[in-house]
Amino acid sequence: MKPLLASFGVFIRQITRDNMLWAVCFAPLLTALIFRFGVPYVDALLCAYFDRAVLLADYYLLFDLWLCLTPSYMACFASAMVLLAERDENMAAYMAVTPVGKTGYMLSRLILPASLAFFFAMLLTHYSSLTDWDLPVLAAVSLVMSLASTAAALLIFSFSRNKVEGMAMAKIASLLFLGLVAPFFLSSKVQYLAGFLPTFWAAKLAHEKSSLYLFPALVISLLWIGRLSTRFRRKLC
Amino acid sequence: MRLWALLRGDVRFQYKYGFYFLYMFLALLYIGMLSVFPDGWRERAAILMIFSDPAAMGLYFMGAIVLLEKSERTLDSIAVSPARTHEYTLSKLFSIGVISVIVGLTIGLVGGAVKITIQFLVGLLLCSCLFSAVGLVIVARSVSLNSFIISTVPVQLLINLPAAAWLFGWQPSWLLLHPGVSMMQLCMPNRPVLPSGVILASWTLAAWVIANRTVAGMFKQIGGVKL
């Protein structure tokens, strides 16, 4: 446990030194403020302009889902960038042969930040959402968002050999979150084409408020993480 | 000749690390997304997509490119080679500009949402060079990829937000001096081309001059010793 915490401490020091820690903390807060106060204001303006009773209100849940994703994605993106930098400097291979080990390295760089982001996402969404959330649904969606963000960070690291490829992969990895919009914009049958994305099931879970969707959400997320973890460990050699 | 060699090296680098493949994929994705937009929105959506991604790719990728060159000691070799700073920066700007223009052209042509004109292509190239030059200025002072990414956020907001606001109808005349707005003007049909072209070219030239100075400073400090 001690080496794990020491390794996590190194990670926190790194992201503090280059100000990423502040971005990870404040970007979700800023997003929450903009969504909580800006979206209803813009909605009112648009409704008046287009002379419509409802315009954005149907998509308030989508804004909440986006907000719920932000802390986890920010934390995991920072982790992925640190992982890439450490690999370019050969630090990752050295860490893997210390008492931290490959699993400890993965835990300290990915799982611990994602776990902290899970609680942050729950608090943030609970206090600044545009729609009403049940606590169990919020916990389940936050969990799936954390797992999906971990999968995105693993994807960035596992399929790139250096920072440049990492940045290119970051663009591809962000497509994992496209699943969020499917239940809102696609018809009932077609939307299931996005079923291979964990975020699709998170959106379904929040949309239908049915715990049935937690099972595919967890299975799909863990399949992504399991497959990518194998590649991650191989990359550390 | 040196510029040509540097340019060839940069294009090879970008090909090797998958830039062409990535943007081919993204172009297809954007074209697919454009096809589901209603007709009235398609042109604006296409311009916004081109402006915020292929045109801005220099700002997104420059940090990773230069920091990788630093960690692989490529910059050490370039610093002591006969290559001049302005050749190094021009090579970076043009090599990324080529991808921006190809992708913008593909989205515009295949998506059928943008009227392809000379001013559109020139505007796209200039805008891409502007973003890349700003990226060079930031990365020359960055110690890590995270610090580069953080530093690019205010720049992206400053360039992107007024341009997006202009595109969706907020059009005070003083905003015409903004580089992003000039790019929008060049992309849209029946707009005054010359003033927008001159404004965008001036911003790009200014950013390139600053980038040259900053990169020259970075070359002098390579290896931990200030020369």
Image (spheres, rainbow, N blue to C red):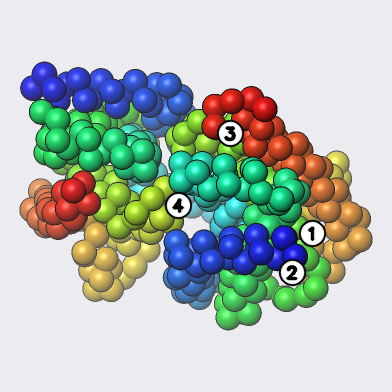
Mark found first going from the N terminus, 1 or 3: 1
Position in image of residue A12 (x %, y %)? 31, 23
Residue beneath the point at 47% across and 34% down = B144
Residue beneath disc 4? A164
Q: Chain of mark 4?
A: A
For residue B210, which quarter of the picture? top right
Amino acid carrying mark 4 in the image: Val
Cβ atoms under marks 3 and 2 closer than 8 Å: no
Amino acid carrying mark 1 in the image: Gln
- CA separation in Å, label 1 and label 3: 41 Å
Q: Which of the two discs, 1 and 2, sits closer to the camera?
A: 2
- Labelled disc at residue B222: 3
Q: Which of the two discs, 1 and 3, sits closer to the camera?
A: 3
Instruction: Report the side of B199 relative to A49 (left or right).
Output: right
Which residue is nearer to you in this view: B38 or B72?
A: B72
Position in image of residue B174 (x %, y %)? 85, 41
- CA separation in Å, label 4 and label 3: 20 Å
Residue beneath the point at 62% across and 72% down = B102
- CA separation in Å, label 3 and label 2: 36 Å
Please tell me whether mark 1 sits on a helix, a strand or a loop.
helix
Please tell me whether mark 2 sits on a helix, a strand or a loop.
helix
Position in image of residue B220 (x %, y %)? 66, 32
Mark found first going from the N terminus, 1 or 2: 2
Residue beneath disc 1? B185
Quadrant of the image containing the N terminus of chain A: top left
Mark found first going from the N terminus, 3 or 2: 2
Q: How many marks?
A: 4
